[in-house]
Image (spheres, rainbow, N blue to C red):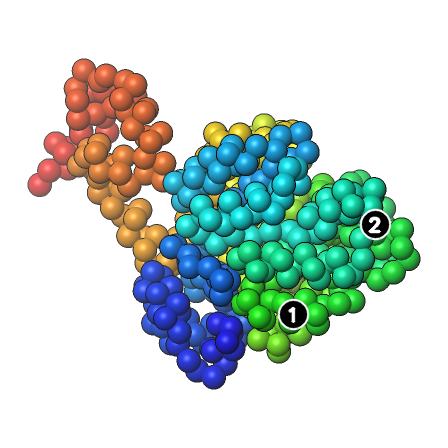
Amino acid sequence: MTQLEAAKINIITPLMKRIAADEGMRAGKLKDLIKSGKAVIPHNKNRLIKKPCGIGAGLRTKINANIGTSTDKSEIKYELKKLDTAIKYGADAVMDLSVGGDLRHSRRMVIKHSSIPVGSVPVYEVAVNAEAKRGGFLNFTHEDVLDTLETQAKDGIDFFTIHSGVTKKTIAALKKKKRILGIVSRGGAITASWIKKNNKENPFYEYFDEILDICYRYDVTLSLGDGLRPGSIMDATDKAQIEELKTLGELAQRAKKRNVQVMIEGPGHVPLNEIRKNMELEKKYCHNAPFYVLGPLVTDVASGYDHISSAIGGAIAASSGADFLCYVTPSEHLRLPSVEDVREGVIAARIAGHAADLVKNRKSAIKWDIAMSGARRSRDWKTQIKLSVDPDKARAYRNSSKPGITDVCTMCGKYCSIKLNEECLRV
């Protein structure tokens, strides 16, 4: 029985009770959110996750970190360092996007070492295996797709990103209005190229019922990927993107009827003034399914600082209805992320998510900020550092300076406004 299936017959599972306790809500309310498709708990039946999480309406905004080998660098030990870093600095989930080396070995190692839910993009492994076995990464069949999904589910993957919305119809919509950057999703581009080469419908769409069978058996949550997401802010919210979104909404309804948990992926590169509209469109067309956004990045010119561009967009997106933020690192568009890039990406996304949770009136978020303000008022440096989103960095900054007066910082010294307040506002 899947979590969704249990919720439909009003069973509150032990996992629901645990997540509800973590969120500070009634278990019955969480059960109802799952029942309605507004929340999901990515948790493969074959795994025991130390730190599971719920994603969706009424829950804390969650953060995902992407790791994985590349064709140029395929050392799994290095990716496990990134995994440890992502978890240490507060990621709620991680995706293994490996395309280099032994993919199944990498996936199993990530799953074994991860205390949080693990996702994947199965078409990557499908393409890599086709290249190795048949001399071309587009030389795969629908049987290869289903076999790969089954294998990954058996291994313990908690959520799949599949690009079922990249169909002949949505590609036709894309061709009618040329984009600056066309298809920027790696999985979406592979899928679209396969459709053109074989003149067949997308196997992730045509064989969606068979995919649901696999997800049901293992209670794998489906993350319906936005293969046609905009890669330039000038391409945002175009007809192709919206056509795909409508298709994902239809597929989400089919998944829920089959007791498979589902969430929707979203853009992408989106200008500030279109972010709220994008969130509203997803909730409308996808029946309030949890929304998992990739950024969004609010400008295309922030190379080296895309984690900041993403955090700006992520804060607006989450405060407007997004439920799950995929981090973006400083190395986005430039190279494979380093361990330090992962740290900065996670922290930036967490700041965005927390800022949104304040807008969502999450009590835990408000208490956190109030506690920090209190520590600043009393100039309690130890508590300030402990309450920081990144205590390591806060501690390093504090320790790097040696103020003459120990209860202030080197910015203001004896002119510290907070210290002066103690005298001028004393009753």
Q: Position of residue 281 (x, y in %)?
A: 65, 62
Q: Nearer the viewer, residue 42 or 422?
A: 42
The residue pinned by badge 1 equals 212
In the displayed structure, 117 sits above or below 392; it is below
Q: Position of residue 16 (x, y in %)?
A: 40, 69
Three-letter amino acid code of the residue under disc 2? Asn
Q: Residue furthest front?
A: 133
The crowding category of the residue bearing disc 1, from other C-alpha atoms within 10 Å (few below 14, some 14 to 19, many at least 20), is many
Q: Nearer the viewer, residue 239 or 159?
A: 159
In the displayed structure, 92 sits above or below 200; it is above
The residue pinned by badge 2 equals 139
Do the residues bearing badges 1 and 2 touch, measured as CB atoms within 8 Å? no
Q: CA distance from mark 1 to mark 2?
A: 24 Å
Three-letter amino acid code of the residue under disc 1? Leu
Position of 24 with respect to 418 (left or right) is right
Position of 32 with respect to 415 (left or right) is right
Q: Would you say residue 301 is visible in this rendering?
A: no
Please tell me which residue is depicted at 66% across the width and 41% down the height of the picture: 99
